[in-house]
Every structure is written in C-alpha cells, then in structure tokens.
Image (cartoon, rainbow, N blue to C red):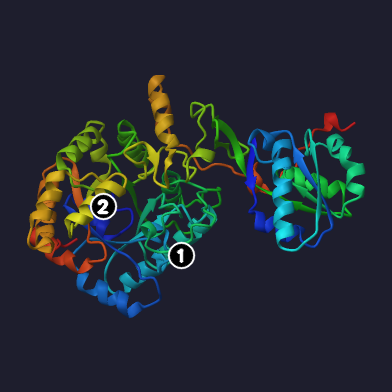
Amino acid sequence: MSNKSGSRLDRVISSGQFAVTVEVGPPRGPDVDAFMQKVRPLAGIADGFNVTDNQTAVVRMSSIAGAKLLLDAGLEPVMQMTCRDRNRIAMQSDLIGASALGIRNCLAISGDHQRAGAGGKLKGHPGCKNVFDVDSIQLVTIIRGMRDNAVQQGGDPISPATPFLIGAAWTPFGPPEEFRVTRLAKKIAAGADFIQTQAVYDVPRFAEAVGKARARGLTEKTAILAGVIVPRSAGMLSYMDANVPGISVPPELIARMKASADPKAEGLKVAVELIAAIRKIPGIRGVHVQAIEAEGLLPDVLKAAGLLPRPEA
Amino acid sequence: MIIGEWKPIEETVKNLATHKKVLLVGCATCVAECAVGGEKEAETLAPLLRMALKKEGHSVEIATKTLERQCEWEFVEEIADSVKGVDAILSIACGIGVQALADRYQDKFVYPGVNTTSLAIREKPGLWTARCGACGDCMLGETFGLCPVARCAKSLMNGPCGGTRRTGKCEIDENIDCVWNLIVKKAEERGRLGDLETVRAPRNWGNSGHGGPKRMVREDLQS
C-alpha cells in the first residue's frame, strides 16, 4: 500500500502499525465551542477521527465542517459521506471542497434510511426524498477515479487530483451472511484502502468471518479495522442485539454487564478485553472504537488497551 | 399494475364542498385490481362522500360512472354526456386517468380522489407490494428477476447494506424483504453467485423521470 493521501492514518496503516480510529458525532447546531470541548481532550488518542454524516438520518453539522474543525484543532478527520443525501454532482463537489480544506480520509457508506430518525428518539425527516443516485461501492469507485485518474465519474477531468485515503464499512454478520465477504471483496476491488466494521461483541464468530476474508486474500489488500462500541449497560447491549442489524451480543456478555455493580467500569473492561481479543485475529490491522454520546471514555479505554501513546507516523 | 389508495375523506370533502354536481369517475383497470378505483369502490365512496358532505352542511349531488380505462381517449370520451351536467369531476383512477379527464374536460374542475403510490403486484389477497421503479434501464436479467431499484429502500446496486435484519427483512420495516437477501439466495440456488461479484458502475438514470419528463416517440406509428 502506497501513501496515497499523505494522511496520518495512511502512514500508520502503510507502515504496518496497528491503527486506531474513533468516532465523533457533530452537534445538532452550530455550537463550535461545545464541539471543541468534546473533541479537544481526544487529541492524540487516535490516528483518525470519524466525523459522521447525519447519522441515523438526523440533521447535524455537516461532516465536512466537522472535519475541518477537527483539522484546525490538530485532529485528523475521517470524513464520512453517505449516499442518502447527495447525487454524484454534490458528492464530487463536496469531495473537491473537502480536499481543498485539507481533508485526506473519506469513508463511503450507504447511510441510514431517512425513516431511521434516531431510532424514533427524534422527529427527523421521514417524509423527505432520498437520493441514492449511487451506492457506497460506486461512491468508492468515484473517489478512486478522482484520486488516481483525476477524473470525475462523468469523464471530465479535475485538476489536481483529490488525494483521499478511501474507507468503507463492513457488516460481516446478517443475512445473506455467505455474501458478506463477497461484498467486502467488491468494496476492495472498487478501491477501499481501509475498512471499518460493524461493532464486534462475538469475537469467535467475527474471527471466522475474517478468516474467510483472509482466505480470499482480502486482508492483504485492505486494512480491516474492527469495530468496538464501549458498552455502558446491559440494557444498551440488549437493545443493540435486538435492534441494530449486524450486531450480535452473546447473552453471557449481557449477563455479565447486568451482574456488575459498576456497569460503566465493567463496560470499559469489556471494551479493553474485546480489543485485546480482536488484536489476536490474524489479518486485523486496527480498531475503530466508539463510545456513543460518551466520547470522554475513549482515552481511558485506549490507554487501558495499551494503544496509547499513538506511534510517530 | 399501478396502485394507489383513497385520499383521506376530509381532503376530498374539502375539494368538493363548493360544488353542486359532481361526477365520480372510476377506472376498471389497475385501480380496480387494487380495489381503490373500480366500479365497486366508486359505488362505496359516493355514499360516504354524500354523507360526509351533508354532515358539514353541503348539498352536493354525486353521480358515478366507471370507465374501462381512464387513460385512453376513446374510453374517456364515453362520459362526455354525463360530464355536461356537472361542475366538477372526482377521479379515482391513477394520476394518468385524472390528467386524461382534466385534459379532455377542460371547463370542469377535476380532482383526484386517490393518491397514486407505485407500480406493484398483488402478492396475496389484500397485499400489494412494489415491483417496478420505472427506471428506464431494466436490470432484472442480472438480478434473477428481483428489482433492487424498486424493492431496496436505498436502490442499492451492489448487494445488501448493513441494515438487513436477522430475519432477512429490511432495516426500515420488518415486513419488507431485503431484496438483496432474496437476490443472493436466488443466485445461490442457480449456482451463479459469481455473477454478483462484479462491481456495478453508477447507473444512467436519464431514461427515467430524472432525465426530464418522458417523451416516447414512435415515428412508425405517427402516420
């Protein structure tokens, strides 16, 4: 893997070091101070900071603006881009804009359907019109074309090229399970340099899926960063197991959280154990750690996991 | 078939309240098949509207007529005499039928009584599900007869998103099949999983409504 983007994440991955990315959700208003208070303590704990793109189909500060704010504060963003809200004209325009602002990592995903509306917690915009002009794999091909050939999807040139490290997501569980490795292979064939996976709680099952990817040579061609969501309660785990497609939580883990007198501390312990177990899976080249609406927990988790300080890159 | 559903009665009542004589026109084709706009439904809707209008103090006469097809001029012509005596028409056909009546009977107010929703099939009695997105570039030959444009909530072209439920249903509704799950299963049955490995390039949507209102020309038929 060459250094295609000049990003830190690219260098960490290319040099074969175990990569760490985390996730920060932009605010639902233009409150820069609050956002910066949340992200500043995270400086230095990861190689890339995912900035979500209106996740769960709820309007937030744009991922481009959020990514630029991170960049200004010295944190390297991974700008997420969904296919739900933009056609290929808007996507490429935003990619050029993001590149001009110095953003070097982009993660292409389908995006939650507008009916998601934060799982019913917020009104959202369920009556809006979606776009889905291209899908996430096609978006990967577009970003790659702009980077490697300095050409737009329609064939017109851009100058200069937009040097992005290209990411994509992988949900190894969930039907049709036998096709999930093929879908990963398609993302890699399209140009995904790195992959962030859906959160893993069932490590043996995940290891089996990674084994299949490894058997197809996929772990050599891309850097798979396994997803870890720091659990905070048994209820949260049960909810995710029942309601978040692609997340499977072993019942004994839920029982363990339930039995704990201090679920927050126990959750941190669980996350650390998950990271340790995931690191042992051959072919896994990093972790993508989320502490949803509790980003403040991330430094402790990563420190306890022995992933701090991050290496020079 | 084209499917639709009755507009809320209150909306139709509001549309008709200022009129004296209304012709309610059904269509015996698609909307009859999906049980919203055929003769039977015309005869059911008319008394409901009469009652609702009367309850609000409006005296509106409603006559009914059902055409074989509201989207063809020769059938549309059949109500010419009936239309003469009314000041408004309520069509319970699809949007095409409504516009055909509005085009032919330009001096009348023409209202839709139905919201047209999609191109669908009757899966079983009482259940219709979308089948075609009229995308203008049919790919059913490559997806084993299952349409991801109309049947995937995100119209994905390269396989299922991460939102497929354990049950094989779509993240947005537990009653909707993940069509990519079905496509993959069908490919597997046929021993053709390899067909789904190719990365499908961005599509040209220009032959659908995205390319501007469709205008199909057949010069050989224009003589």
Q: Residues within 10 Å of mark 1 (few under 14, many from 20)?
A: some
Q: Amino acid at mark 1?
A: Gly
Q: Residue at the location (49% across, 26% down)? A: B144
> Looking at the picture, which amino acid does disc 2 mark?
Tyr
Q: Is residue B136 left or right of residue A278?
A: right
Q: How many marks?
A: 2
In percent of width and height, residue A164 lies at 37, 56
Mark linked to residue A97: 1
Disc 2: CA contacts within 10 A as few (<14), some (14-19) or many (>=20) = few
- The extreme bottom residue here reads A33
Could you give the CA–CA distance between mark 2 and mark 1, rounded to whole angstroms?
38 Å
Q: Which residue is mark 2?
A: A239
> Is the Cβ of the residue at disc 2 closer than 8 Å to that at disc 1?
no
| Residue B106, x across and y down, in percent | 87, 52
Query: Which is more toward the observer, A16 or A132?
Result: A132
Q: Secondary structure at mark 2?
A: helix
> Looking at the picture, how far across and down is residue B49, in whole percent?
72, 52
State the SS at label 1: helix
* Residue B135 visible in the current orientation: no
Do we see residue B158 in this rendering? Answer: yes
Answer with left or right where residue A308 lies relative to residue A48: left
What chain is tagged by disc 1? Answer: A
A159 or A142, nearer to the observer = A142
Image coordinates of residue A134 in percent, x first then y, are: 49, 47
| Image point (12%, 49%), residue name | A255
Q: Are marks 2 and 1 on the same chain?
A: yes
- For marks 2 and 1, the one nearer the N-term is 1
Q: Nearer the viewer, mark 2 or mark 1?
A: 2
Q: Is residue A194 left or right of residue A159?
A: left
Q: Residue furthest top?
A: B190
Q: Quadrant of the C terminus of chain A?
A: bottom left
Quarter of the view holding residue A73? bottom left
